[in-house]
Image (cartoon, rainbow, N blue to C red):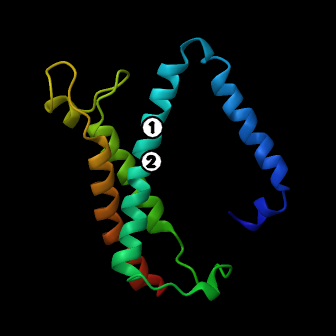
Amino acid sequence: MTHYTQAVPRFIWTFIGTLVYCAIAIPGYSHFESVLENFMLLIGYWLAIYEGISLTEHFIFKKRVYDISIWNSPGLLPPGMAAVLAFCFGVFGAVMGMAQVWFIGPIGRKIGTPGYGGDVGFELAFCFSALSFMVFRTFEKNHFGR
């Protein structure tokens, strides 16, 4: 979060989050199970992207060693462009491989049963985000030196 969001008290962020989940829960109360299932599937794709980026940073670039003294010094931390671009590639991988009730991606359509496909969105999201992060983070490290 930026220093602009720190100016807003935490209870306001909590209140905004509560409004958001109420806005999702109230219309979906009559078919709660399907709303929850669809929402949880989206979180699963996000988790694959997050893991692809964070595990790559942890094992390849940081080599399990962190300088905790710079946690609040934006000028010493990576700019984050590599992570944002890798996130976009991960979303692309998830969309290409998903097989959900509301959408079947082109790769997901070719796997599994005809007409229903097979969901490989989690695996593709992880691979697309991890591989693209390796490329973008290497460039970012060479260009910015951090």
Measured as percent of width and height from the top left, residue 94 is found at 33, 43
Measured as percent of width and height from the top left, residue 126 is found at 32, 54
User: Distance of mark 2 from mark 1, alpha carbons?
Assistant: 6 Å
**Which of the numbered marks, if any, corresponds to residue 145?**
none
Q: Which residue is mark 2?
A: 46
Would you place residue 4 above or below residue 134 in this image? above
Would you place residue 10 above or below residue 71 in this image? above
Measured as percent of width and height from the top left, residue 24 is found at 63, 26
- Tell me whether the residue at label 2 lies in contact with that at label 1, contact meaning CB atoms closer than 8 angstroms: yes
- Pick whichever, 5 or 30, lies toward us: 30
Q: Which three-letter amino acid code belongs to the residue tagged 1? A: Leu
- Pick whichever, 119 or 132, lies toward us: 119
The residue located at (38%, 83%) in the rendering is: 63
The residue located at (84%, 62%) in the rendering is: 7
**Which of the numbered marks, if any, corresponds to residue 42?**
1
As drawn, is 49 to the left or to the right of 123? right
Name the outermost residue toward the top: 30
